[in-house]
Image: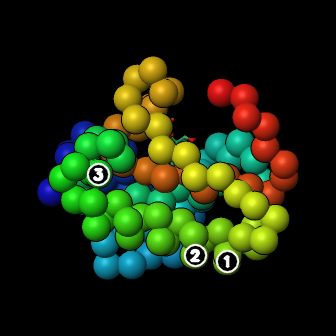
Amino acid sequence: MTDADCLFCKIVAGEIPNDTVTETEDVLAFRDISPKVPVHVLVVPKQHSTHAGELAGSEPELLAQVMRVGAEVARSEGVAESGYRFVFNCGGDSGQEVFHTHLHVLGGRPLSMAV
Ligand code: AMP
């Protein structure tokens, strides 16, 4: 299932270029176009869903795959030992801007708890 108006569906479809980090049959990881920290990778399920809270209810195995790939990205980006953060923004008040489930993998320097 895809959403014709969804930015990340277009990236998954190859209609918009991306800087791919890794890919599986069901998941794509690519560098954030505007990195907030030295390591900032987005991991998205190829199938459209609005956010991780929705996917947790509909396809928890797919959400687990997203997190497994996120952990692999942390290792391949060299931040698994130093530490990193997983962020899922879910809905407007969270600051979510792209309404296609995505995991932010953030690291490469100490992070504060500021929200
Ligand atoms: P969120 O605020 O959680 O919805 O995060 C959306 C993220 O997508 C932001 O960090 C943006 O910088 C990032 N982003 C937007 N457009 C692109 C793009 N074309 N390629 C890669 N990352 C993007």
CB atoms at circles 1 and 2 under 8 Å apart?
A: yes
Mark 3 crowdedness (10 Å alpha carbons): few <14, some 14-19, many ≥20: few
Residue under label 3 = 56
Please report the residue visible at 38 percent of the width from the left and 66 percent of the height from the top. Answer: 64
Real-space Cα distance between discs 1 and 2? 6 Å
Query: Looking at this view, is 5 or 49 the one in front?
Result: 49
Q: Earlier in the sequence, mark 2 or mark 3?
A: 3
Mark 1 crowdedness (10 Å alpha carbons): few <14, some 14-19, many ≥20: few
Question: Residue 54: x percent and y percent?
Answer: 26, 43
Q: Earlier in the sequence, mark 1 or mark 3?
A: 3
User: Looking at the image, is mark 1 or mark 3 nearer the viewer?
Assistant: 3
Residue under label 1 = 76
Q: Which mark is residue 72?
A: 2
Determine whether, in the image, residue 55 is placed left or right of residue 40: left
Question: Residue 108: x percent and y percent?
Answer: 80, 57
User: Looking at the image, is mark 2 or mark 3 nearer the viewer?
Assistant: 3
Mark 2 crowdedness (10 Å alpha carbons): few <14, some 14-19, many ≥20: some
